[in-house]
């Protein structure tokens, strides 16, 4: 037995993955399924039918109190004031430098409560950051409830049909009218849970936040719809190829604290023209001076697969780096995201990528690489 | 499990056969099981000079890149371009139509593992 297995964390659904013969890998401190049937087959299942993801390792941080929403407005870069009860938005937290702390989804549950879903790899860092910033606000409480919540993502064209199996009958109508990025609470096996129409795949889908002790039964109900919906368990390998086709960012790959939201291509989620947030002045300066790096989508024209860290050349000059790259199963080609100097290559241009010593031809193309169907 | 007994095996999970001065190299289904979906195969060119134990190509899966190592020195006579173009077919017949490279060589392959030895090796690693 090695040290990793004795200290690795397991989600409430771990035994299900073992029984399903999942290939398990260490993911941070967690032991997670990277694939079951195979990455490509699982990827296509999500695009064509519906896939179930155990994403219980993600973090759930609750901000509560009279000033909760005002604090979240200061803490995050998107506009919390635009949210009504039961609405969420993609956002991020930045340092004063304008560099990312993390990207996240923030849900306004009600006028005094917000749920922030953060990356698994950043839970402790994010919680410490949020707590330290909340010290400047009164009547705000910050709780890291990640250890109490499991999370199941249900993604694909048949996701609504699969969800009906695990929700009480009287919630079927609520589900069918749920708008993209919205959330409602519902009882699952008698326990309070949240159902959000959000996801990381680019397909119509849902993310269920539920207490650990009802995760297993809920997973079983969803999987039991398989004969009708084609539902299958999906691992982290396909989660990555799916999000990359949709050009969704992955912290650690596409950005870290040395990269700003403007450089990462999420200026659309950054409210530079209204009230203050941490990092706003640094980002305004970047905007005024011209953002020096940008994150673009590319596809390989030559054979080969570009990966994170490979150098990108334009007209013979090294201009940037691949931040995420992979074989893309739905597009049957290789491609990804690259962060390059703003002044050079634009959509349509050819660049070269150094793949293990050989320069391979690629083309900058419009994002997203796959036409998403989330709405 | 049972690996084809007429073949020899390397510690890096290649299989090798030898006939009339030509060694044929492929990878085992154990290696394929470890790799997962193969998405890219890079093979050498005919007439390339090969050194024993050097990397002659790569097999890339969704998550990793693995070198294909040659257990012999010699010259590449043929490469399986059909499989290189249709890498998803490699898993269908890794010991037959999934051969990868043929190398003309004066080396012997007797020192490589037998099927039984390879089976023991994969169980231990």
Image (cartoon, coloured by chain):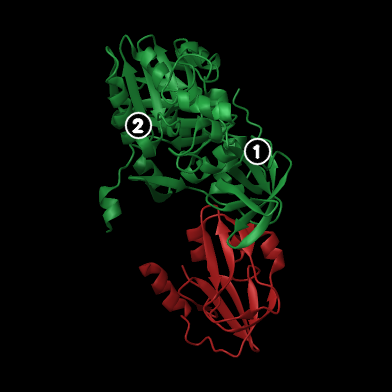
Chain colours: A green, B red
Answer above or below: position of A288 versus A1.
above
Q: Residues within 10 Å of mark 1 (few under 14, many from 20)?
A: many
Element assignment for label 2: helix
Q: Residue at x 47, y 80 (%)?
A: B114
Q: Quadrant of the N terminus of chain A?
A: bottom left
Spot occupied by residue A103 in the image (x, y as percentages of width and height): 45, 31
Element carrying mark 1: loop
User: Residue A83: which disc?
Assistant: none
Q: Chain of mark 1?
A: A
The disc numbered 2 marks a residue on which chain? Answer: A
Q: Which residue is mark 1?
A: A369
Observer able to see residue A308: yes
Q: Which residue is mark 2?
A: A126
Mark with earlier residue (1, 2): 2
Left or right: residue A86 compared with residue B83: left
Distance in Å between CA atoms under marks 1 and 2: 30 Å
Q: Quadrant of residue A217?
A: top left
Badge 2 local density, few (<14 within 10 Å), some, or many (20+)?
many
Closer to the camera, B112 or A250?
Answer: A250
**Which residue lies most toward the front here?**
A289
Towards the viewer: B99 or A343 = A343
Q: Nearer the viewer, residue A212 or A172?
A: A212
Residue at point 54%, 67% (across, down): B67
Q: Quadrant of residue A122?
A: top left
- Above or below, A322 relative to A107: below
User: Is A375 displayed left or right of A253 in the figure?
Assistant: right
- Does residue A144 appear in the picture of this structure? no
Residue A32 % position (x, y)? 39, 45
Q: Quadrant of residue B40?
A: bottom right
Rendered residue at 45%/42% (across/down): A252
Is residue A342 positioned above or below B95 on the image? above
């Amino acid at each position: 037995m090695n040290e990793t297995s004795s200290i690795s964390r397991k989600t409430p659904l771990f035994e299900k993955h073992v029984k399903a013969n999942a290939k398990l890998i260490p993911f941070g401190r967690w032991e997670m399924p990277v694939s079951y049937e195979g990455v490509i087959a699982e990827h296509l299942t999500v695009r064509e039918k519906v896939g179930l993801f155990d994403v219980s390792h993600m973090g759930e941080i609750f901000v509560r109190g009279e000033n909760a929403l005002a604090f979240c407005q200061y803490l995050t870069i998107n506009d919390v004031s635009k949210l009504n009860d039961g609405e969420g938005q993609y956002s991020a937290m930045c340092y004063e430098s304008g560099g990312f702390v993390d990207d996240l989804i923030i849900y306004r549950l009600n006028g005094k409560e917000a749920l922030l879903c953060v990356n698994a790899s950043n839970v402790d860092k994010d919680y410490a950051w949020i707590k330290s910033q909340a010290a400047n606000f009164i009547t705000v409480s910050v709780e890291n409830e990640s250890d109490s919540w499991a999370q199941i993502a249900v993604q694909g064209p048949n996701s609504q049909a699969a969800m009906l199996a695990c929700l009480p009958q009287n919630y079927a109508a609520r589900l069918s009218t749920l708008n993209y990025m919205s959330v409602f609470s519902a009882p699952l096996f008698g326990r309070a849970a949240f159902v959000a129409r959000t996801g990381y795949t680019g397909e119509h889908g849902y993310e269920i936040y539920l207490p650990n002790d009802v995760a297993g039964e809920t997973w079983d109900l969803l999987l039991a719809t398989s004969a009708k919906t084609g539902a299958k368990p999906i691992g982290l390998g396909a989660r990555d190829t799916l999000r990359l086709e949709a050009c969704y960012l992955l912290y650690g790959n596409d950005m870290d604290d040395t990269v700003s939201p403007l450089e990462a291509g999420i200026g659309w989620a950054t409210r530079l023209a209204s009230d203050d947030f941490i990092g706003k002045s640094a980002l305004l300066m970047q905007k005024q001076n011209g953002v020096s790096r940008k994150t673009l989508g590319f596809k390989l024209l030559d054979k080969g697969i570009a990966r994170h860290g490979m150098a990108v050349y334009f007209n013979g000059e090294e201009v940037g780096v691949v931040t995420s790259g992979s074989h893309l199963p739905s597009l049957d080609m290789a491609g990804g995201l690259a962060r390059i100097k703003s002044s050079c290559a634009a959509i349509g241009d050819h660049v070269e990528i150094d793949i293990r010593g050989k320069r391979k031809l690629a083309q900058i193309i419009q994002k997203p690489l796959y036409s998403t169907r989330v709405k | 499990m049972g690996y084809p007994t007429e073949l020899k095996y390397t510690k890096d999970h290649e299989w090798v056969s030898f006939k009339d001065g030509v060694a044929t190299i492929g990878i085992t289904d154990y290696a394929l099981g470890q790799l997962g979906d193969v998405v890219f195969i890079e093979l050498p060119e005919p007439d390339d000079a090969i050194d024993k134990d050097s990397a002659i190509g790569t097999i890339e899966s969704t998550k990793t890149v693995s070198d294909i190592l040659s257990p012999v020195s010699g010259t590449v006579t043929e490469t399986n371009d059909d499989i290189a173009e249709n890498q998803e077919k490699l898993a269908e017949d890794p010991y037959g139509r999934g051969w990868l490279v043929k190398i003309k060589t004066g080396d012997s392959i007797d020192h490589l593992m037998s099927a039984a030895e390879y089976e023991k090796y994969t169980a231990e690693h």
